Image (tube, rainbow, N blue to C red):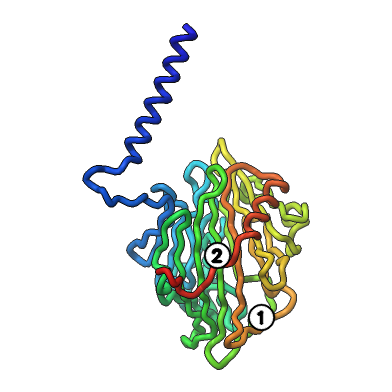
Amino acid sequence: MKGRIYWSILFAVVASLALAASVHAADPALPGAKPVPAMQAIPLPYDQAAFEHEGRELTRYHFGENLRRPFWYPMVGPGGRSLTRMGMPGDPARSVTQASQPEDPNRPASPGGHSHQNSVWISHKDVGGIDFWRDAGPIAGQIVHQFVADGFHYIDGEKAGMLSVNAWNGPDCKLLMTDRRRSTVAPGDGDSWWLVIDLQLEAPKGGEVTLGKTPFGPIGVRMAKPVGVNDGGGRILNSEGQRNEKEAFRKPARWVDYSGPVTNDAAGGVTLMDHPNNPRHPAPFHVRDNGWMGACLTLHEPMTIKDGEPVRLRYGLWMHAGVPDAKELDRQWQAFAAEALPAFEKPKSE
């Protein structure tokens, strides 16, 4: 009996190896066939781009001109469910029409005020006195996608990425700031994966712009409802060992992890990381038990950006299964911190 089991196992192994070899062997009809990249950035209709790993979509970048700002959604976790959501639980989002209208004190209040919390997004509460954080109001601005930068047209390979250019326009359509935004998606350990966001904030030519003192910006993450501390019994942990809003609220840290139940059988979460090269690192993190977290750039004092002196920022998001401990989270941050910063100019090889 043992001999039969041995030979059955051996046969199965040999057969699987033979199948793998046949799959990877070049088809005689395609002598010039090249390897298919594991990671792909795929342009989609309606101003979207999907980032896929071996055919599985991990996230999608939304950048239509009717949006108040671009964002990434979903952020796929265990069971194929998104670790993030659109809008705050219990606070209905305003419609696009409402969001584009200035507030009128004589008009009944909108039923919701958190339509800006779109999964993962880049914005700032005060850019030259204009509010790019909220969706409505007399001083609400709009971050408008301009184009995908030349030389970065949906890059595939071990990592997938794109570099877009965005205009930060005031309510009068005046350009206050430009950002160059590089989105890079890559597989991580096990079923985990990464979204790394590189930003270069630039003042208008011949001018300058001031990012005002505020806890809101430049990056926000709205967690899925079941992951939240209040709604799902999740957990917030930062690099200093502080837990949940009571301890970690607006405290400086290298990283903050938000983990909680994603399905009835699995937990997961997102770790938001501040790169050591970022100005004012370690960043204070604005975290809430209601499922929100963000890294602050100008919590304590404003920052002025001058023409020819852009501000460079890098944030990492690690999407993972389970509830990792501080040791594992710090190991992931060390790997993120050790990576060289990519260039924003067009690669010479492309």
Amino acid type at mark 2: Ile
Q: Position of residue 107 (x, y in %)?
A: 51, 77
- Helix, strand or loop at label 1? It is loop
Q: Quadrant of residue 273?
A: bottom right
Q: Residue at x 40, y 62 (%)?
A: 49
Amino acid type at mark 1: Gly
How crowded is the residue under tag 1: few (<14 C-alpha within 10 Å), some, or many (20+)? many
User: Is residue 268 positioned above or below 344 on the image?
Assistant: above
Q: Earlier in the sequence, mark 2 or mark 1?
A: 2
Q: How many marks?
A: 2
Mark on residue 64? Answer: none
Q: Quadrant of residue 350?
A: bottom left
Q: Residue at x 73, y 78 (%)?
A: 301
Q: Nearer the viewer, residue 39 or 217?
A: 39
Residue found at the far left of this picture: 29
Q: Position of residue 67 (x, y in %)?
A: 44, 71
Q: Nearer the viewer, residue 48 or 8?
A: 8
Residue tagged 2: 197
- Say which of marks 2 and 1 sits in front: 2
Q: Position of residue 140 (x, y in %)?
A: 54, 79
Q: Is residue 98 visible?
A: no
Residue tagged 1: 212
